[in-house]
Image (tube, helix red, strand yellow):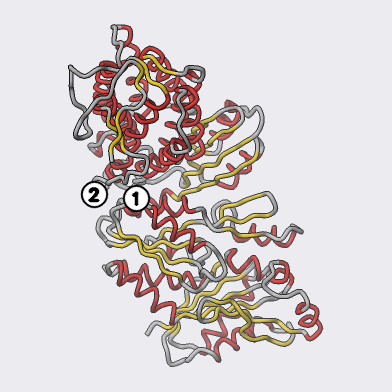
C-alpha cells in the first residue's frame, strides 16, 4: 500500500504509479514541510537505505574492511522508524527532535553514530519550527553537518562527513539562488551529494585500492535519495510495509588488514552536564575512530580499542553506562572475507565455552551475554574476562546475574552474516535455564536478510554447548548446507555429555540452583556434588564425591569410568581459577581413554561459573564416531 504526500504546506496531492525520482513540471511543489510530510520523507529514505543494506556491507572497507556498515546504518535507522510509528507529529521541529533521540539510542557503528549526530544537529537548529521552509531546511542541514564533524576526534575527508557537508552546502547555495521549493532544492543537493560520493576514492587511498566508494557515504546518499523521491512523487511506503532487500552477489570489497585496534566498542552514557570534549580527548588515549555523539545529558560513545573494559570504566566516570557493545573486528574481517570457503555461518552465544583458537579456525561468531554485579553490567568475555569474573564473584557480596543478549544484538549478527553467507545457523544455550534462545529466535524472525536463518537449542551449556556448536561449524567448513549443519548440531547434542564438579555449594545456593537446606547437610557429610546436563536440557545432580582430599583426581577417575575407552571422544575441560585441578582431571582422563582428543584447557565461562563458583571444573565429552 502506498500513501500520498500528506503534509506539504502549499502543495496538493501528487500522484505517481511507482517510486523513483522523476520530473513532473506540471505538479504543484512544496514550499514548506510540516511534521507529517517530513516523517513521510524520512520513512521513504529509510526504506531505501535499508533495502540496500547488503550492498553497503559489501563495499565497506574504511576504516576497517569488516563488512558491517550497511547493517549498522540499517539498525540505527530502524530505531528511527520505530519512533516515527509512535504517533503523528505535525510539528516539524519536534519530529526532528524525536528522530534524533531515537537515532542516538539506536546508533551502531562509526557511520551510525555520525548519522545520529547529524540528525541531532539538524533537530537542534529546527527545534522550534512547526514547518520548515527550504531556507530553514538548508540551515538545519548545515547545523547537522557541523555537529557531525564536531563529534569526531579525527575527522577524515572522503567519508560520510564529506558527503554530508557537500549536501548541506549545496542545499544552502540552492536557496541563495532562489530555490523556493523542495523539488528544486533536493535535485541540486542530491546531485552534488552523488558527485561527492563518486569522488570519495580520490580522497581515501583505501577506497581507491578497493575500487569502491565510501560505504557510510553511500548510505547517506541513499537516505536523501529516498527523501527526494518522496518530494518528487508524493508517494511514501506504509508504516508496516515490508522492505525488499536488493541482492548483491559480489564478493566483499577490499582485503583483510592488520588492525591496530581490534574491538569496535560502543556504549551509551547518561548523566548531567557530560563534558563531551574531555570524554573525546580521554577516549582518544585508548583507541581510534572516536565518535562522541549526543548531548550534555546523553552520549553515544564509539571507539576502536584493544581494551573494552578500560573504555567502559572510563565511560562510567562520566555517567551511567548502558548499551555496551564490543565487536571483534578481526573476527568480522575473517567472516566477511571468507571467500566462499563455506556457505553457512555458525553463530553461538558466549554461554558456550571454546578455546579462542577453535573459534578463529572455524570462523565462528559469538554474541555476548550480559553479566550483572548489582548495577554494574559487563559484556561476557569481552568487557569481563573469566579470571576477573571469578575474582569479583569471590569478593562481591552481591550474587551476579546473567541475562540474555537483547534481540537487537542477535539481529545485528544475523543481518551482518546474512550479507556474506547463504545461511546462518545459531546454536544456543539450553532454553530450559535461560531466555537466550528465545531472544535469538525473536531476532531471527525479524531479521532482514536474504540468507536463511536456522536456530538450534543445544540443550546444553558451557563446554557442552561449545562442542555442539563446534561440530556444526565443522559441518559448515566441510561445505554442508544449512539443514545439514543444523542436523550435525542435533546429532552432536545427542553424543555430548557435560559435568561440573562443585568445590563449594555457596554460589549454587546463592543463585537458587540448589536449595539452601542442602548445603549444611553436604558440608556435614563432606559431599562434593557433581552437576550434570541431563537429556532434555535440564541441569541436575549427576553424582557426588565424599571428601575433598584428591578431589580432582577422583573426579577424573569418576568420569573416566563413565566413558567407554573403546570409543573416540573429543573432550573439553574448563576451570574456575584452579588450573592445576583441571590439569589433574585431564591426566586422569587421558590415562584411561586412549582414543580421546583433548581441546586446550580453558577458563570456565559465566554460564555455569555463576553457579559453580571458584574451584569448579567442567568436563564435556563428545563421542565422535
- Considering the image in quadrants, where does the C terminus appear? bottom left
For disc 1, the marked residue is: 448
The residue depicted at 50 percent of the width and 38 percent of the height is 302
The residues bearing labels 1 and 2 have C-alpha atoms spaced at a distance of: 19 Å
Q: Position of residue 334 (x, y in %)?
A: 35, 54
Q: Quadrant of residue 167?
A: top left
First of labels 1, 2 by sequence position = 2
Between circles 1 and 2, the one closer to the viewer is 1
Q: Quadrant of residue 132?
A: top left
Kindly give the residue lying farthest to the top in the view shown. 177
Kindly give the residue lying farthest to the front in the view shown. 12
Nearest the viewer among 492 and 547 is 492
Marks 1,2: beta carbons within 8 A: no
The vertical placement of 455 against 254, above or below, is: below
In the picture, the disc for residue 251 is: 2
Q: Secondary structure at mark 2?
A: loop
Q: Position of residue 491 (x, y in %)?
A: 38, 79
Nearest the viewer among 372 and 98 is 98
Nearest the viewer among 249 and 355 is 249
Q: Is residue 202 visible?
A: no
Badge 2 local density, few (<14 within 10 Å), some, or many (20+)?
some
Q: Secondary structure at mark 1?
A: loop
Whether residue 98 sits left or right of residue 501 in the image: it is: left
Amino acid at each position: 500500500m502506498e500513501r500520498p504526500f500528506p503534509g506539504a504546506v502549499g502543495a496538493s496531492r501528487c500522484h505517481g504509479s511507482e517510486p523513483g525520482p522523476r520530473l513532473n513540471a506540471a505538479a504543484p511543489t512544496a514550499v514548506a514541510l510540516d511534521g507529517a510530510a517530513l516523517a513521510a520523507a524520512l520513512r521513504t529514505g529509510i526504506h531505501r537505505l535499508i533495502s540496500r543494506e547488503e550492498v553497503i556491507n559489501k563495499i565497506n572497507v574504511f576504516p576497517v574492511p569488516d563488512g558491517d556498515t550497511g547493517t549498522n546504518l540499517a539498525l540505527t535507522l530502524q530505531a528511527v522508524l520505530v519512533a516515527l510509528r509512535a504517533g503523528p507529529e505535525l510539528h516539524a521541529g519536534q519530529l526532528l527532535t524525536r528522530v534524533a533521540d531515537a537515532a542516538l539510542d539506536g546508533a551502531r557503528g562509526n557511520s551510525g553514530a555520525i548519522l545520529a549526530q547529524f540528525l541531532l544537529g539538524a533537530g537542534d537548529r529546527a527545534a522550534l519550527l512547526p514547518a520548515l521552509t527550504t531556507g530553514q531546511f538548508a540551515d538545519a542541514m548545515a547545523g547537522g553537518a557541523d555537529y557531525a564533524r564536531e563529534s569526531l576526534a579525527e575527522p577524515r575527508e572522503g567519508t560520510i562527513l564529506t558527503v554530508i557537508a557537500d549536501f548541506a552546502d549545496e542545499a544552502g547555495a540552492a536557496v541563495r539562488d532562489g530555490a523556493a521549493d523542495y523539488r528544486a532544492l533536493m535535485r541540486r543537493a542530491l546531485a552534488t551529494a552523488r558527485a561527492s560520493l563518486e569522488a570519495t576514492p580520490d580522497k581515501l587511498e583505501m577506497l581507491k585500492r578497493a575500487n569502491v566508494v565510501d560505504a557510510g557515504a553511500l548510505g547517506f546518499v541513499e537516505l536523501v535519495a529516498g527523501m527526494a523521491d518522496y518530494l518528487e512523487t508524493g508517494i511514501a511506503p506504509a508504516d508496516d510495509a515490508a522492505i525488499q532487500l536488493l541482492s548483491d552477489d559480489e564478493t566483499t570489497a577490499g582485503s583483510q588488514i592488520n588492525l591496530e585496534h581490534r574491538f569496535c566498542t560502543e556504549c551509551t552514557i547518561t548523566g548531567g552536564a557530560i563534558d563531551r570534549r574531555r570524554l573525546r580527548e580521554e577516549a582518544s588515549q585508548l583507541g581510534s575512530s572516536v565518535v562522541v555523539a549526543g548531548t550534555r545529558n546523553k552520549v553515544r560513545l564509539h571507539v576502536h580499542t584493544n581494551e573494552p573494559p578500560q573504555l567502559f570504566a572510563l565511560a562510567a566516570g562520566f555517567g551511567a553506562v548502558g548499551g555496551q557493545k564490543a565487536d571483534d573486528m578481526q573476527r568480522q574481517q575473517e567472516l566477511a572475507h571468507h571467500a566462499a570457503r563455506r556457505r553457512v555461518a555458525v553463530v553461538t552465544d558466549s554461554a558456550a565455552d571454546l578455546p579462542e583458537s577453535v573459534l578463529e579456525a572455524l570462523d565462528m561468531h559469538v554474541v555476548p551475554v550480559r553479566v550483572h554485579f548489582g548495577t554494574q553490567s559487563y559484556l561476557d568475555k569481552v568487557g569481563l574476562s573469566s579470571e576477573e569474573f571469578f575474582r569479583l564473584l569471590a569478593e562481591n557480596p552481591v550474587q551476579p546475574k546473567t541475562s540474555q543478549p537483547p534481540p537487537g544484538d542477535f539481529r545485528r549478527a544475523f543481518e551482518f552474516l546474512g550479507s556474506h553467507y547463504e545461511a546462518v545457523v545459531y546454536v544456543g544455550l539450553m532454553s530450559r535455564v535461560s531466555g537466550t534462545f528465545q531472544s535469538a529466535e525473536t531476532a531471527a524472525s525479524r531479521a532482514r536478510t536474504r540468507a536463511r536463518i536456522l536456530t538450534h537449542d543445544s540443550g546444553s551449556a558451557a563446554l557442552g554447548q561449545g562442542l555442539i556448536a563446534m561440530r556444526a561449524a565443522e559441518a559448515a567448513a566441510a561445505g554442508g548446507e544449512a539443514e545439514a549443519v543444523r542436523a550435525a548440531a542435533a546429532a552432536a547434542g545427542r553424543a555430548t555429555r557435560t559435568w561440573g564438579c562443585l568445590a563449594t555449594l555457596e554460589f549454587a545456593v546463592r543463585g537458587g540452583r540448589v536449595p539452601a537446606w542442602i548445603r549444611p547437610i553436604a558440608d556435614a557429610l563432606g559431599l562434593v556434588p557433581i552437576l550434570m546436563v541431563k537429556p532434555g536440557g535440564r541441569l541436575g545432580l549427576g553424582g557426588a564425591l565424599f571428601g575433598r582430599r584428591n578431589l580432582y583426581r577422583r573426579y577424573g577417575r569418576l568420569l573416566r569410568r563413565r566413558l567407554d575407552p573403546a570409543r573416540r571422544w573429543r573432550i573439553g575441560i574448563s576451570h574456575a581459577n584452579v588450573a592445576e585441578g583441571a590439569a589433574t582431571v585431564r591426566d586422569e582422563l587421558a590415562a584411561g581413554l586412549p582414543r580421546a582428543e583433548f581441546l586446550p584447557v580453558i577458563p570456565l565461562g559465566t554460564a555455569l561459573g555463576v553457579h559453580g563458583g571458584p574451584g569448579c571444573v567442567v568436563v564435556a565429552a563428545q563421542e565422535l564416531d
